[in-house]
Image (cartoon, rainbow, N blue to C red):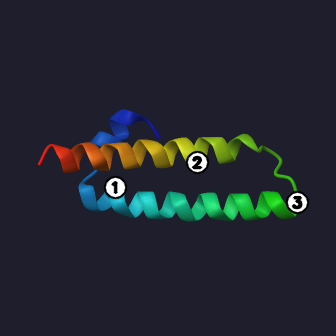
Amino acid sequence: MKTAEIKELTTAELQERLAAEKEALNRLQLNHSISPLDNPLQIKVARRNIARLATELRAREINK
């Protein structure tokens, strides 16, 4: 997910996306611990998406 796409979302949508991404990351990590993923870089990408979403939420919180 690109930064420009994230900035277009509303705060409520950001919070929903963040929750969904965290859930997806937990699922990926659990699946990876049971049997190796075909592409373990998916975990890295998910973590970075979570960080981008959290950063944008925090920036909006500060700018209020």
| Earlier-in-chain disc, 2 versus 1 | 1
Q: Residue at x 11, y 49 (%)?
A: 64
Q: Which mark is residue 14?
A: 1
Please state the horizontal and vertical placement of residue 20, each as a whole percent of the image: 49, 63
> In this figure, which residue is indicated by the disc labeled 2?
46
Q: Position of residue 33 (x, y in %)?
A: 82, 60
Above or below: residue 26 compared with residue 10: below
The residues tagged by marks 1 and 3 sit, at their Cα atoms, a distance apart of 31 Å
Query: Which residue is at a point 24% across and 54% down the rendered structure image?
Result: 10
Residue 25 placement, left or right of 55: right
Q: Amino acid at mark 2?
A: Ala
Q: Residues within 10 Å of mark 1 (few under 14, many from 20)?
A: some
Residue beneath disc 3:
35
> Which three-letter amino acid code belongs to the residue tagged 1?
Leu
Q: Residue furthest left?
A: 64
| Mark 3 or 2, nearer chain start | 3
The answer for how far apart the CA atoms under marks 2 and 1 are is 15 Å
Judged from this view, the residue extending furthest toward the right is 35
Foreground of the two, 61 or 9: 61
Work out whether 43 lies above or below 31. above
Q: Secondary structure at mark 1?
A: helix
Q: Are marks 3 and 2 in contact (CB under 8 Å)?
A: no
Q: Quadrant of residue 34?
A: bottom right
Looking at the image, is 13 positioned above or below residue 50?
A: below
Name the residue located 36 percent from the left edge and 43 percent from the top edge.
55
Which element is circle 2 on? Answer: helix
Marks 3 and 2, how far apart at CA: 18 Å
Question: Who comes first in sequence, dot 1 or dot 3?
Answer: 1
Which three-letter amino acid code belongs to the residue tagged 3? Ser
